[in-house]
Image: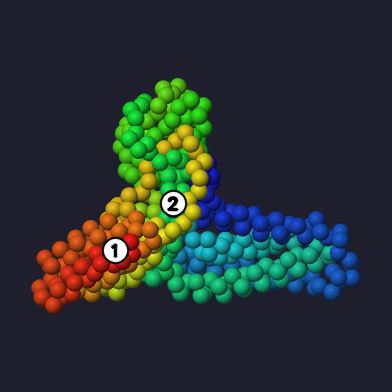
Amino acid sequence: MTRWQWLLAQFTRRLWVRSALFSLLGALTALVAIWLKPFIPPAVSVRIGADAVDNVLGIMASSMLAVTTFSLGAMVSAYAAAATGVTPRATMLLLQDTKAQNALSTFIGAFLFSIVGIVALSTGVYGGEGRAVLFIATIAVIALVVVTLLRWIEYLSRLGRLGETTRRVEEAAAEALRERRRKPHLGALPPPAGGMAEGVPILASETGYLQHLDVAALDKLAQAAGGRIDVLVLPGAFVARESILARSSRRLADEQLGAVQKAFSIGDMRSFDQDPRFGLSVLAEIASRALSPAVNDPGTAIDVIGRAVRILSIWAGEGAEEEPACRHVTVPGLDEHDLLDDVFTPLARDGAALVEVGIRVQKALAILAAAGSGRLTPAALRHAELAAARAVATLTFEPDRRAVVDLSARVRAAAKLGN
């Protein structure tokens, strides 16, 4: 995905953009009756009462305004509940949820359709035939609103709930890791075996998180310069102003250097799109909050462990990797130790005093150690030992300690069987 495609995707995920499009569609639907009225036979318009459309549009306008206000209040409450009860980092997924945006945009579009229709009727531009077209369009809009409202009522029962929000985080992390599994180096070449050669440093123009990397743009610039660009940081990394983002094997002109810097999109927050580690970190936040003394919900932590296993199994599994399309750029790959650090280190630390969490961590690591081609085996073994050491240092009941230590030994046995 290029930088402009990514920016367009970020723009279209905003609520007001979708609402504006639906509002425009609603207004155009009300006005299209003026253009279609010459095609309506007079006999059809006679059967429709003069006041039929006016009354229906008036009822729709008032009811849609109330429904929209109620829906906005319900969404704000759901976002607040997710921020306080789950984690604030997960609310961006709720804000970008297309189902909620489509429902709210449909209500706003229907409201604007009604208002435009009432205004146009008051001017007399429709005539009898135009009223017939508007009446048919109104019936269609009412049917759409009823279906959307029924689906919205069912959806509101889940919006902002812990399980629903955690599921969204899992889906975002899994999608990002699945894409990275297909393109381990974001469509570029891996770093040279002997390490990256010295070159002209490319510095960051601002401080923040690297949200997106436009590898295709870097490839074109490197090809035009007759050299190679070695990227040093991955999306999700926090970079400071004038820190080194990449190195170029050829000296670049000022315009080319500025274009290279634009290929690194830096913002104040991490993004889920090219950063699968962010999804794992958010899941770990959810588990840590659940394991805090104020919440004391080990069940949620155990649920997160299962979701983490599903996500990481994507990276451990066999899959076809695409041939690199950008052969003038090198990008480092994900480190398996980092992937497991993001989720299992907080879980093992905060759940060390709970034997049920410790047991589930060891079972999860045993699955990952034996999964797929074994690329997660070293990291799983390391975390099994660390988690067992934390549990032994924290648990006071000897049988509980022994249960965790025994399972830790089984992780190594599972790794040998899997490989």
Up/down of 145 relative to 16, above or below: below
Q: Position of residue 96 (x, y in %)?
A: 48, 57
Q: Which residue is mark 2?
A: 180
Q: Position of residue 3 (x, y in %)?
A: 50, 41
Neighbours of disc 2 within 10 Å: few (<14), some (14-19), many (20+): many
Q: Residue at x 80, y 56 (%)?
A: 35
Neighbours of disc 1 within 10 Å: few (<14), some (14-19), many (20+): many
Up/down of 137 relative to 263, above or below: below
Task: Give the quadrant of residue 91.
Answer: bottom left
Say if residue 3 shows up in the picture: no
Asked if residue 146 lies left or right of residue 312, the reply is right
Lower position in the chain sequence, tag 1 or tag 2? 2
Asked if residue 4 lies left or right of residue 389, the reply is right
Q: Position of residue 354 (x, y in %)?
A: 19, 72
Q: Residue at x 47, y 30 (%)?
A: 222
Asked if residue 320 lies left or right of residue 266, the reply is right
